[in-house]
Image (tube, rainbow, N blue to C red):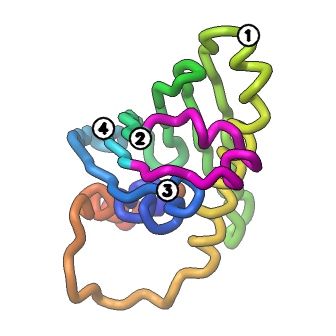
Amino acid sequence: MVNYDYNHQNGTHKELFKITNCNVNAFEEKGYYATVKQELIRANNTLGEIIKNPVLGILPKTLSNTLEYAFPSTTAFFAKTPIGDIAQIHILYPETDKITRTFILMYARVVNPLMKFLFKNSVLQAAATVIEQDTGAVESLYPRQKPKIRLPNEEIMFYAEKLYRDW
Ligand SMILES: [Fe+2]
């Protein structure tokens, strides 16, 4: 569900990317397949953060991303960055009844070799941090309660939950 939750980015990943807003411009679903167009608005990272992870210094303040889903295992995240076009494929697979594993495959169409040399490790480090944060969020969930308020864009998460319940 965390991969379908368009309210978690500006919480779970807020510190890393300084996300102030997450807008969903389009959501289309066709059975197990869905596409989302998302716009993330960012504030500036501190100099210290950029020194630790240089890619944070060149990411634009508005990130327009496309996500394509194949329930339940696959989320493909497409982003245009100053380094080049990035495709990040998140895979979930059940290992046992109680253990689910995850990994990502990351592809980049790099604009120039210097950018690749300078930013490759930083991009991979940011991606690894995102996965750690998502995993941490899932591992430390509060017990489920009936929600008393509605948040924007929740229908995408409810769509995934319905697929899960009807599986
Ligand atoms: Fe996430």
At mark 4, the secondary structure is strand
Please state which amino acid type lies under the numbered disc 2: Lys
Q: Position of residue 159 (x, y in %)?
A: 28, 57
Which tag, 4 or 3, sits closer to the chain's start? 3
The residue that disc 2 covers is: 61
The residue that disc 3 covers is: 18
Q: CA distance from mark 4 to mark 3?
A: 20 Å
Disc 3: CA contacts within 10 A as few (<14), some (14-19) or many (>=20): many
Please state which amino acid type lies under the numbered disc 3: Lys
Which tag, 2 or 3, sits closer to the chain's start? 3
Q: CA distance from mark 4 to mark 1?
A: 29 Å
Q: Position of residue 49 (x, y in %)?
A: 68, 53
Which tag, 1 or 3, sits closer to the chain's start? 3
Residue depicted at x 38% and y 58%: 20
The residue that disc 4 covers is: 37
Q: Which mark is residue 113?
A: 1
Q: CA distance from mark 1 to mark 3?
A: 28 Å
Residue depicted at x 54% and y 47%: 73
At mark 3, the secondary structure is loop
Q: CA distance from mark 4 to mark 2?
A: 17 Å
Q: Which mark is residue 42?
A: none
- Decide whether residue 99 is among the magenta residues: no
Q: Is mark 4 within 8 Å of ligand 1?
A: no
Q: CA distance from mark 2 to mark 3?
A: 9 Å
Q: Is residue 124 left or right of residue 66?
A: right
Q: Is residue 49 left or right of residue 11?
A: right
Q: Is residue 149 above or below residue 37?
A: below
Please state which amino acid type lies under the numbered disc 4: Lys
Q: Position of residue 167 (x, y in %)?
A: 40, 59
Q: Which residues are magenta?
A: 42-60
Residue depicted at x 47% and y 30%: 79
The answer to which quarter of the image holds residue 132 is bottom right
